[in-house]
Amino acid sequence: MKQYLLSVLSAAIISAVVLKLMGDKGSRGAVGKLVVGLFLTFTVISPIRAVSIDDWTNLPDSYTVAAQEAVAAGEAQTKSALQQSIKQSCEAYILDKARGLDVALEVEVTVSDDPIPIPVSVRLRGRVSPNAKTKLSDLIEKDLGVSKEEQSWI
């Protein structure tokens, strides 16, 4: 970059000197301005020659790959957040129903890996009367769709 700036600055100084020597009037002045303009244009544009066309052809591919990776990462984060949200909502729902029956439980819900996660199993830990256990088990099956076989009581 430093070399580029020095070459442009040098070309500008040389151009100013040439224009001053040639004068502004007549055909010499017009030809001088044309030559100086072409010289300055060439000096400013010349670094573009170093850019290879191959570099430009791979550019869209690299952006496409980077964009696809970003989309995949975003989808994974969204799916994980959705799974966590559904898991926490189901656990809070079960704990709320358990409190309504005066039961203290620890609850862990497992959700599916589907595009829209659903609860697939529930693990419950705590002292529960047979009556409260039956009521909670029925609520979990009816409201959350987790069969009694997928409910683990510890």
Image (cartoon, rainbow, N blue to C red):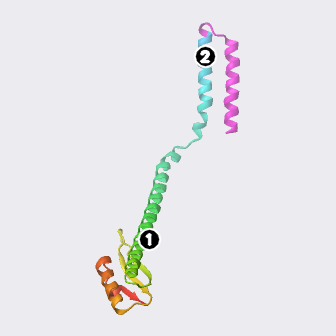
Q: Is residue 37 above or below residue 114?
A: above
Query: What's the CA distance linking mark 2 and mark 1?
Result: 71 Å
* Residue drawn 50% across the image and 49% down it: 59
* Residue drawn 70% across the image and 28% down it: 10
**Element type at mark 2:** helix
- Work out which quarter of the rendered image holds the N terminus and state it: top right
Most foreground residue, 60 or 88: 88
Q: Give the image location of residue 34, x and y in percent.
A: 58, 18
Where does label 2 land, which residue? 33
For the stretch drawn in magenta, the main secondary structure is helix
Most foreground residue, 39 or 114: 114
Q: Give the image location of residue 49, x and y in percent.
A: 58, 37
Write down the region rendered in magenta.
1-27
Q: Is residue 46 above or below residue 95?
A: above
**Element type at mark 1:** helix
Q: Is residue 3 left or right of residue 69?
A: right
Residue type beneath disc 1? Gln
| Badge 2 or badge 1: first in the primary sequence | 2
Where does label 1 land, which residue? 84
Q: Determine the image quadrant of residue 99.
A: bottom left
Q: Is residue 110 magenta?
A: no
* Residue drawn 30% across the image and 77% down it: 143
Cβ–Cβ under 8 Å for marks 2 and 1: no
Q: Determine the image quadrant of residue 108.
A: bottom left
* Residue drawn 67% across the image and 24% down it: 12
Answer few, some or many: residues within 10 Å of disc 2's Cα (few below 14, many 20 plus, some between 14 and 19): some
Q: Is residue 119 above or below residue 36?
A: below
